[in-house]
Image: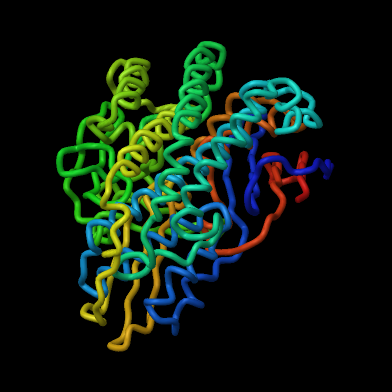
Amino acid sequence: MREIRIPVTRVEGHGLITVHLDGGGRVREARFHVTEARGFERFCQGRTVWEMPGITARICGICPVSHLLASAKAGDAILAVRPPRPADKLRRLMNLGQYIQSHALSFFHLSSPDLLLGWDADPAKRNVLGLAAERPQLALDGIRLRAFGQEIIAALGERRVHPAWAVPGGVRSPLSPEARDRLAAKLPEARRIATDALELYEKSVPAWAEEVETFGNFPSLFMSLVTPEGLWEHHDGRLRFVDSDRRIVADGLDPSRYFEFIGEAVEGWSYLKFPYWRPLGYPEGMYRVGPLARLNCCDRIGTPLADEALRRFRESAGGKAVTSSFHYHWARLIEIVAAIERAALYLEDPEVLSSRVRAEAGVNELSGVGVHEAPRGTLLHHYEVDETGVIVRANLIVSTGHNNLAMNRTVAQIAERYLQGKKKIPEGLLNRLEGGIRAYDPCLSCSVHAAGRMPLRVVLLGPEGEVLDEVVRDP
């Protein structure tokens, strides 16, 4: 066994990739294992529904707003209330801030070093510092754009990470006029950065033809929320499934009945669940969520710049679904533009300054489901409570979980392209395997409700199960 230790770059959570070769040196099987232990579903038992938004926000420091809002929506269902309209708009505004900051982190800081410096570049330079040296304006723009998203979150929740703000029935406080004006003044710069990055990506697509073809390019279903009119949606609506031709497979599905059409399988080699579309069974019922799925599922976005970008995005696939997971990066940039345009509309709306932001009620239902679109995809919180509102059971399906089957398929596709006949794992291949996973922007700790930053390991196995090579990247 050979072990190479390389400082980890741009991988969140604890992951293991195993690649099995047959006697002829061909890839027989490749798996992406998530090896952290889960926890939140169990230790939420015994806590009250009113505590859950603040507790589940601690699942992750990258996606706290996502869990905060999904949890609050599950609480709405248990209280059987609809938050006042100003509260709904404020929740949406915070979620847009989360989209901006999370997508900016993914593209500018985590993925751009590969996309712009090259997959085979020196790993000592293939990072955000190397990007800053090569493209200082782009690196600075990424910092400023992410900061703008975080400022939206802080203006509402008083902190950028883990804001204890959304609650069952609404939110704790409205937006102040001063904060609104401060955010509105920064919109032009944010819009300029987002459109510049989108233009850069679109011009670079021809140079990435090989990656587009091999990084998760296969037919599958796609799932996301849409409005009743079929518009891009991120906080409410009904679920839609489309196929690789963008034909609607199912529409208008009630998210609170998710268990009727989404199954959850488990495997002995990963702590991450394997959700699937029940009508096709497991594992044939693979589907994808997140930015790529949202743009494939919706009819249009509903804002001018984003809709024009969506038109160009769809033209690249001849009007069918964009099936290459490499283009999650493209979809994220379009969603940043959409989020900025939507945020501008909310900041112009006088209702976001209203103090009528919370509906008061007690426990009226013993079960509640909160579903909304986190940056990484559809996020689901399902709570069952007793008569006093104490949690007796919690089930979470996070975005990374929905994408689990697709991530495994992507790892196999990349390994088949680059590993045939090899007995060693070159650095460039390791980075491509990692990049295939990174395209989904997974939150591995979030997906198994654990904490911590652990290594990525890739193991190459021969036909008899012997270890041919192993690469470990330390935290």
Q: Residue at x 26, y 64 (%)?
A: 356
Number of disc labels: 0
In this view of the protein, which residue sits in the foreground, 320 or 234? Answer: 234
Q: In this orientation, which residue lies closer to the viewer: 72 or 84?
A: 84
Picture quadrant where residue 170 is located: bottom left
Q: Residue at x 78, y 30 (%)?
A: 123
Image quadrant assignment for residue 295:
top left
Q: Residue 267: where, in percent of width, then height?
A: 50, 58
188 in relation to 100, above or below: above
Q: 432 left or right of 313?
A: right
The residue closer to the viewer here, 397 or 354, is 354
- Residue 409, compared with residue 90, is above or below; it is above
Residue 86 is left or right of residue 264, and the answer is left
Q: Residue at x 66, y 33 (%)?
A: 23
Q: Would residue 405 be visible to someone looking at this image? A: no
Query: Who's the residue at 63% across and 53% down the image?
Result: 13
Residue 244 place in picture, x, y as percent? 31, 29
Residue 114 image point, x, y percent: 65, 27
